[in-house]
Amino acid sequence: MKYMTALQDSKRLPRNASIAFHLAALLTFFIYALYRLTHDDLFLFTLFSLALVPISISLGLEIKHRGAILHKQITLILVCITIAISCYSLGYKSLIYVFPTIFIFFFIFNFKNASSISSFYVLICLIAALNIETYSLVWRFGVAIFDCIIFAAIFAYIIAKQKAALIYLATTDELTGALNRKNLATSLSSSIESFKHTGTDTSLLLIDIDHFKTVNDTYGHLVGDKLLTQFSEVIKHLLPAEAKLFRFGGEEFLVQYEHCDLQKALEMAQRLKQAVNQTDFDGVPVNVSCSIGVAELRISDSLEEWLKQSDIALYAAKKSGRNRVVSRLDK
């Protein structure tokens, strides 16, 4: 499943690679437009010159860090339309340019769309080329081009599979399966920006397993590891899709719950606490409980202040006897 998710995300073309693709397309179309002009082919000269406009605009946006995937997709579609039209006039001379554009589809569209759109694009180009080429030649080009689509799809899947594995290893705590702290600051900063611009509520739930050190000291680290793994599963099972679970450190876990105000966060915290109380943890010969500090995001909060308030609330929960939920104390 995680591999298919990576395939969906594979359209996120790195900026430097995107700029390189844009420059290559600009150079190719510019040279080809001049070449058609020297052959007094004003129609194709105009067509390829016009194609330079969206490529240039998309490149400018990319250089200014304002490029969006939609800009790249529209630009590629316009370039492909230009190539398809030229296939009607030039036949195999334009079919040659179909090959590199096929691979670009798999960089900026998801796997399913890249496969279907590139196949449709190839069919249009082949049909257009029949205007001046023989069926035999077009057939040979068609076989070669569809082979390229198959190879591009296989290549995209392999890359996405490797990417998914690397992302999982880089962002996931091996023991518990929760997210690690690598992207925590980025994720929290994104919530802060969203709250400032759109008012989207987000709350933090900082969770600590009560008396975890005693479990480790009394029964050993293997039992402690079992507890951490099962505890994480209990929490993840109850969290909705818009909530992320991070292993914050040791026996502490942090829930980043988006679209969640204080009341909703407190209700979730109580559900989590009760679920932990009612769970019989396999291989752990003690009753397990947890303390939870809840901090809703406020407009004045920095990332550090937001985390600090959740930590203060957690400390208050532990100090007041543990197995409790406490919301942030500052008013």
Image (spheres, grey):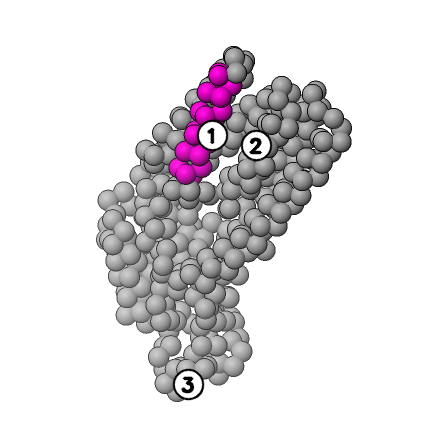
Compute the Cα span from label 3 to label 1. 66 Å
Which amino acid is tagged 2? Tyr
Q: Is residue 62 magenta?
A: no
Q: Residues within 10 Å of mark 2 (few under 14, many from 20)?
A: some
> Where is 282 relative to 162, above or below?
below
Quadrant of the drawing holding the N terminus: bottom right
Residue 220: mark: 3
Q: Residues within 10 Å of mark 3 (few under 14, many from 20)?
A: few
Residue 242 point in image, percent of width and height: 47, 49
Which-is-in-front pick, marks 2 and 3?
Answer: 2
Label 2: which residue? 97
Label 1–label 2 contact, CB within 8 A: yes
**Which residue is rendered at x = 32% and y = 42% of the image?**
193
Residue 262 relative to residue 69: left or right: left
> Where is 217 relative to 231, above or below?
below
**How many dots with numbers?**
3
Query: Which region is colored magenta?
Result: 18-38
For residue 142, say whether it is visible. yes
Compute the Cα span from label 2 to label 3. 65 Å
Label 1: which residue? 28
Which amino acid is tagged 3? Gly
Q: Earlier in the sequence, mark 2 or mark 3?
A: 2
Foreground residue, 242 or 133? 133
Residue 290 relative to residue 308: left or right: right
Residue 77 point in image, percent of width and height: 54, 28
Compute the Cα span from label 1 to label 2. 10 Å
Dot 3 lies on which element?
loop
Which residue is at the far right? 135
Dot 2 lies on which element?
loop
Q: Earlier in the sequence, mark 3 or mark 1?
A: 1
